Image (tube, helix red, strand yellow):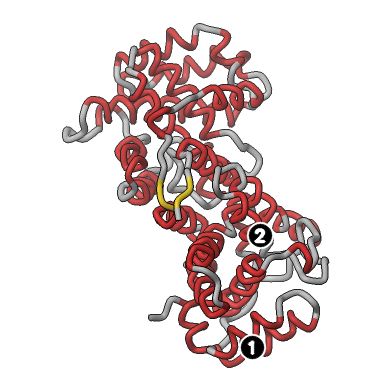
Amino acid sequence: MSIRIDLKSAVLALSDALDLVGVNDFQHGKRVAVMAREVGLALGLPRDRLDDLFCAGLLHDIGVSCTTEQQRLAWEWEWAGKDAHCRRGHHLLRPFGHLSRLAETVRYHHTPWTELPDFLSEAEAVQGNLVLLADRVDALLIRQGLDNPLALREGICAEVAATADRVLAPEVFAAFRAVAAREAFWIGLAPRHVLRYLADMALPDWRVTIDFPQFHPVARLVSSIVDAKSPFTASHSMGVAKLARHLGERLGLPEESVVQVEIAGLMHDVGKLCVPDEIVEKPARLTATEFSVMERHSFETFQILRHIPGMETIAEWAAFHHEALNGRGYPFRHAADRLRPEARIVAVADVFQALCQHRPYRGAHPPEEIPRLLEGFVARGVLDGDLVALAGEDLDASWRAATQAG
């Protein structure tokens, strides 16, 4: 089975997911990418390096999944823990083909120019410094307000200049001063202009064709970012994916569908990055307002995944995991006639795996209790009874898949 994966679209979708971590600021990575590239253009970098720089800007915070960490990075430039997400991002990107080209830039995007290690190539050092510059400028914008970046130009340039001799390469600072003198640079940071900038980017080296199973590592990358959001959800996406594969095989789905439903399981909670940490980890029942925030996550999953060519159907299977056969689920209120077997599998796997895990408001349920609890969902018209029975018939194997125990 082969589909065409536009890696540019996948990178932009991943950037959309990472921007959700900001909760109320959805374009940090995109603005960093735009600013870094504009300064890189002033430096005269060749097109291929500009493209890699742009993608590194989009994904520079790939090691961040917690809203509290993201907020500290924006508001505390000298925070002692700021380097941790750089190391995590480097670890995540290094194994993956094209994405590995961004790993060193991401690793050192918080390291001042005078402290960069000698083993970096000049290109890697400059790219990391450009992302550092753009990241710092955007942090200042976030702190002071994004309504009119042009009005903030003088103050931001003064703050950048105050530490430029230690933090920035001389040529990077000089290029920034030249670019920052243009009003268009600042006006172009408005959301509609940033989106147009992204749409105009061709990124020819970031379009590849891969066999669909080869997309699995990228899906695992996404799931690891999501599951790192809280210790209570560690390995949740992986467990859902493994159980979804197990149920798909037991149901007799074709192998290509089994692979796709596993991918849907890995990526089903990507939209949960938009949910603040205090809601995910609340040790009590959510208020109506808090639950309305939680309900956003499956819709965000749909919006992110459906824009990756070849992923449109998987986007539905992933995003429908809180729909119910009786039509009372969320966010689309789809009923049984709209929910394909693969979507129902992900829904069953999601509930089963969640019951296996400790959550802030309860302990983990032992395997023998899970069939009874799942039957309650069936009785209420939420889950597919045949699939629940399928999971229960081989409970030990289902539990091992959900918990990845062997």
Q: Amino acid at mark 1?
A: Pro
Residue for point 59% across, 73% down: 349
Q: Give the crowd class for mark 2: few <14, some 14-19, many >=20 residues within 10 Å.
A: some
Vertical relation: 361 (above or below) 37: below
Q: Amino acid at mark 2?
A: Ile
From the viewer's side, name the closer residue of 175 and 244.
244
Residue 50 in the image: state x and y as whole percent: 38, 23
From the viewer's side, name the closer residue of 61 and 377.
377
Give residue 120's quadrant in the image.
top left
Residue 71 in the image: state x and y as whole percent: 55, 43
Q: Is residue 213 left or right of residue 391?
A: left
Under circle 2, the secondary element is helix
Give residue 362's quadrant in the image.
bottom right
Residue linked to disc 2: 279
Q: Give the crowd class for mark 1: few <14, some 14-19, many >=20 residues within 10 Å.
A: some
Residue for point 36% across, 42% down: 99
From the viewer's side, name the closer residue of 176 and 355.
355
Which numbered disc flags the more N-terminal residue, 1 or 2?
A: 2
Residue for point 57% across, 54% down: 270
Residue for point 48% across, 39% down: 6
Quarter in which the N terminus is drawn:
bottom left
Residue linked to disc 1: 371
